[in-house]
Image: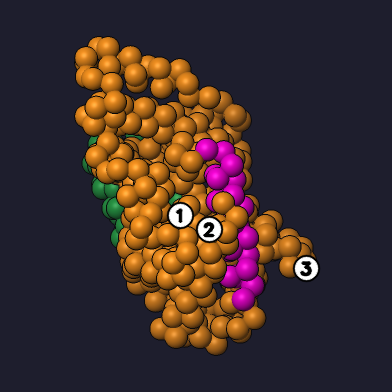
Chain colours: A orange, B green
């Protein structure tokens, strides 16, 4: 799919710049040019697509959809699925949580949404696709959804309602869905385009620096670290590699944009795929700043249970990937 | 006299929206009181799901994204 781009990068680096083919510098620059262009093309495609879906299916509709009828457990899937295509800024997680639960959506389902949303988003999908190809991307997306469903379900069985903070419990006493105060007549497709473009542009602008730094670091590692370098240290056979990677990843706060280009090189240099996926899930899925925000709605005990359940699910999926990939 | 409310827990997007509102008010010369609501408990009274939210006279006009100066100007002069 990107053969033309590889030819272009080869031509640019080896012919135009006249850098020797297969030299370390040449490999590094080639990697940088090729990956940067490829990722930005994919990023534009995916953010636009998600922008269109989102324009027609904003979060209010997701909530209405989920509360409209009885789902008999299928709501875990619906919530996790919409979590992946609905972007929201992490500072929205509290209003979103309260709004969902207040609207009558079960706590576990709400948490499933909250887990899947940062785990699988437009930027992650685009970069995964660019770095690891379609198959791995599909595996990542599907496992992100399944993981959110399972974690949400486990949390719902723990009856955590009593561990919410007092003001949230107070709010939840009268559950209702009201969507007052919002007047907007639905625009047609062409009227939507400027907003969609702007949103997509904003997302790309926000992550581009991280991507460039990530690819630059990845490019250097690609050129200068020998293939298979890490194999001796972090092999599939080491049972502690996944949990250690995840536990290091959880408190880290970064977006996938900066971390994945480096991940790709780590895989190339011998770190197992599952360990890498688990690490990136831990980095984007859970973080200290997110925990601080959630403290507003969850007591410390509930927050710790929430983090623990998600962490364990990520570790398990890491092992799973290491065995199937 | 219009009342403009910007709801958001203080994330960069909310701050940008708030500054855009101030700029739009200045440019249009519309008489308006601009209120920033950062307290989550207060915010939930308005039934918001995503922040920032821009409300003009208690009607939510923009939800979950940054409203730019021109857009706010258009909303103010309607």
Q: Earlier in the sequence, mark 2 or mark 3?
A: 3
* Residue shown at the point (67%, 64%) measured from the top left: A76
In terms of image quadrants, where is residue B33? bottom left
Identify which residue, A53 or A7, lies in the foreground: A7
Query: Quick check: A104 left or right of A163?
Result: right
- Among the 4 quarters of the image, the one containing residue A54: top right
- Seen at 31% across and 39% down, the residue is A222
Q: Is residue A107 within the magenta segment?
A: no
Q: Residues within 10 Å of mark 2 (few under 14, many from 20)?
A: many
Q: Chain of mark 1?
A: A
Name the spot of residue A224 as percent of width and height, x first. 24, 40
Residue occupying image coordinates x 42% and y 29%: A38
The percent coordinates of residue B30 (x first, y second) are 30, 42
The chain carrying label 3 is A
Give the class, few, some or many, for how many residues have Cα within 10 Å of label 1's Cα (few <14, many ≥20): many
User: Does the residue at mark 2 contact the one at mark 1 (Cβ under 8 Å)?
Assistant: yes
Element under disc 2: helix
The residue to which callout 3 is attached is A72
Query: Magenta residues?
Result: A133-154
Name of the residue lying farthest toward the top: A16
Which residue position holds label 2? Answer: A322
Q: Is residue A134 left or right of residue B28?
A: right
Determine the residue positioned at 51% across, 86% down.
A163
Name the spot of residue A93 as percent of width and height, x first.
Answer: 45, 63
Q: CA distance from mark 2 to mark 1?
A: 6 Å
A312, above or below A71, in the image? below
The residue indicated by pointer 1 is A272
Chain at tag 2: A
In terms of secondary structure, what is the magenta stretch mainly?
helix
- For the question of whether residue A100 can be seen, the reply is no
> How far is disc 3 from disc 1 in space, using C-alphas?
38 Å
Which residue is nearer to you in this view: A230 or B70? Answer: A230
């Amino acid at each position: 799919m990107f053969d033309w781009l590889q030819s272009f990068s080869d031509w640019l680096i080896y012919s135009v710049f006249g850098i020797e083919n297969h030299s370390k510098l040449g490999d590094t620059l080639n990697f940088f040019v090729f990956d940067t262009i490829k990722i930005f093309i994919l990023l534009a495609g995916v953010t636009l697509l998600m922008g269109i879906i989102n324009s027609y299916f904003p979060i209010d509709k997701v909530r209405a959809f989920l509360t409209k009828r009885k789902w008999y457990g299928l709501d875990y899937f619906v919530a996790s699925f919409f979590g992946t295509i609905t972007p929201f800024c992490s500072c929205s997680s509290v209003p979103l949580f309260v709004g969902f639960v207040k609207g009558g959506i079960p706590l576990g389902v709400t948490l499933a949404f909250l887990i899947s949303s940062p785990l699988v988003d437009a930027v992650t999908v685009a970069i995964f696709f660019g770095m690891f190809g379609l198959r791995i991307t599909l595996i990542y997306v599907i496992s992100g959804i399944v993981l959110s469903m399972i974690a949400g379900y486990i949390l719902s069985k723990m009856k955590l309602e009593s561990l919410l903070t007092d003001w949230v419990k107070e709010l939840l006493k009268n559950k209702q869905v009201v969507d007052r105060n919002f007047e907007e007549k639905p625009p047609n497709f062409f009227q939507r385009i400027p907003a969609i473009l702007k949103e997509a542009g904003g997302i790309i602008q926000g992550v581009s620096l991280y991507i460039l730094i990530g690819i630059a670091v990845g490019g250097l590692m690609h050129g200068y670290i020998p293939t298979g370098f890490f194999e001796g240290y972090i092999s599939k056979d080491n049972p502690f590699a996944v949990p250690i990677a995840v536990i290091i990843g959880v408190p880290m706060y970064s977006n996938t944009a900066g971390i994945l280009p480096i991940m790709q090189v780590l895989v190339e240099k011998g770190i197992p795929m599952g360990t890498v996926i688990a690490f990136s899930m831990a980095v984007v899925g859970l973080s200290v700043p997110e925990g601080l925000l959630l403290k507003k709605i969850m007591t410390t005990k509930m927050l710790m249970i929430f983090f623990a359940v998600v962490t364990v699910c990520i570790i398990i999926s890491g092992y799973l990937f290491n065995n199937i990939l | 006299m219009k009342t403009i409310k910007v709801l958001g827990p203080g994330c960069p997007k909310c701050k940008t929206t708030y500054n855009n509102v101030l700029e739009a008010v200045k440019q249009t010369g519309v008489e308006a009181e601009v209120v920033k609501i950062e307290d989550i408990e207060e915010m939930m009274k308005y039934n918001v799901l995503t922040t920032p939210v821009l409300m003009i006279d208690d009607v939510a006009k923009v939800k979950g994204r940054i409203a730019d100066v021109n857009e706010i100007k258009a909303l103010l002069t309607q």
